[in-house]
Image (cartoon, rainbow, N blue to C red):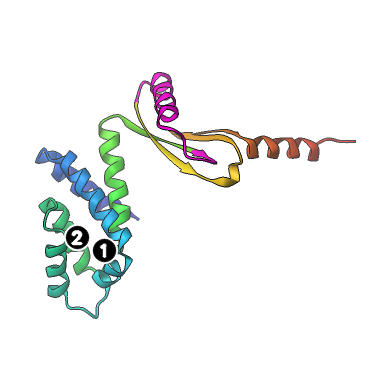
Amino acid sequence: MSNVKNYAEALFSLSEELGKSESVLLDVSTARDSLSENPDYLKLADTPVVSVPEKLSLIDSAFSSLDESVVSLMKILCEKHSVHLFSDIAKEYVSLYNESRGIFSAEVISAEPLAETQQNKLKEKLEKITGKTIVIKNTVDKSVLGGIKLRYMGRELDGTLKGRLNAIENAFKNTIL
């Protein structure tokens, strides 16, 4: 995993130095999404069966609109048959970018997608509590039954119906009759 971190740190340092970290952030996300939507392309980029020059040419044509540093990183990974690491590198880059700008993510897990107004209210409340800029990611998990589970800045708050039922079950198990 240290290679992932090293690649992400190198890309982030370069983009900061060139004053392009925000556009690189968008391009890294675009490339990550493209690769995850096309797993066959990812396999092709990592296979030793296809020659490296052919794969590099494919990267040039598929990602020509992206920042040169992102494309170069993809080519380096291609030469090492490690394009499969790009998603993790992108995730690490986003973390470095957010950390450098005081942006923190919060994951809200709910049985149904939260309405935009609910997400905005939660975001405002968390920003007021933490004094940080918060980005909300809503994950839908039908097993929570109702309520929400909130994960942010190393904390987890469980206000789900499933969590409450588990607490009641544990209380009964620990009751001595």
Residue 125 lies in magenta, yes or no? yes
**How far from the left and from the top, in percent, is residue 21?**
17, 40
Residue at 44% in and 39% down: 138
Looking at this view, name the residue that lies furthest to the right: 177
Residue at 21% in and 78% down: 50
- Image check: 88 left or right of 106? left
**Residue 3 vertical placement versus 103 (above, below):** below
Q: Residue 40 falls in which quadrant of the image? A: bottom left
Upstream in sequence: badge 1 or badge 2: 2
Look at the numbered discs 1 and 2 and tell me whether their residues touch, using CB distance below 8 Å.
yes
**How far from the left and from the top, in percent, is residue 172?**
80, 37
Given residues 79 and 62, the one toward you in this image is: 62
Residue at 25% in and 33% down: 100
Looking at this view, name the residue that lies furthest to the bottom: 49
Circle on res. 74: 2
**Residue 138 vertical placement versus 72 (above, below):** above
For marks 1 and 2, give the CA distance. 6 Å
Given residues 161 and 78, the one toward you in this image is: 161
- Count of labels in the image: 2
Look at the image and tell me in which quarter the N terminus lies: bottom left
Residue at 26% in and 49% down: 29
Circle on res. 129: none
Q: Within 10 angstroms of label 1, few (less than 14), some, or many (20 or more) residues? A: many
